[in-house]
Image (cartoon, grey):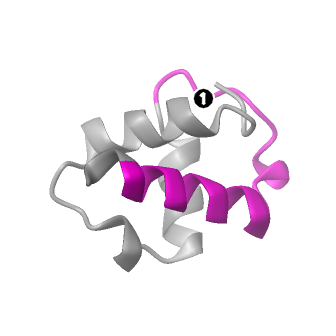
Amino acid sequence: MKWTDVRDIAIALAEKHPGIDPRSVRFVDLHNCVVDLEGFDDDHARGGEKVLEAIQATWMDEVE
């Protein structure tokens, strides 16, 4: 997975962390959760605020 795979990342986060409300996750923690996902293989520095916002919003859609 790459940072651009927003939906795939959100699905993986929802599956790996089913009890977590995505709205309560700080961006630093979200960044760490993403780079720790199995299959994630991208430059850690590319995970900026805009992509993290998109991932968080998509993750919220996945759990609703």
Magenta stretch encompasses residue 7: no
The amino acid marked with disc number 1 is: Phe
Is 45 left or right of 63, judged from the image as shown?
Answer: right
What secondary structure is found at the residue carrying circle 1? loop
- Point out residue 38 in the picture as x, y percentages from the top left corner: 46, 26
Is 46 left or right of 26, judged from the image as shown?
Answer: right
Q: In which quarter of the image is residue 52?
A: bottom right
Is 63 placed above or below 50 here? above
Q: Quadrant of residue 25?
A: bottom left
In front of the other: 18 or 35: 18
Say which residue label 1 marks. Answer: 40
Is 3 placed above or below 61 here? above
- Point out residue 35 in the picture as x, y percentages from the top left corner: 58, 44
Residue at horizontal 59%, vertical 59%? 31
Residue at horizontal 62%, vertical 40%? 6
Q: What stretch is highlighted in magenta?
A: 38-61
Residue at horizontal 39%, vertical 52%? 61
Q: In which quarter of the image is residue 20?
A: bottom left
In front of the other: 37 or 11: 11
In front of the other: 21 or 40: 21
- Point out residue 47 in the picture as x, y percentages from the top left corner: 75, 54
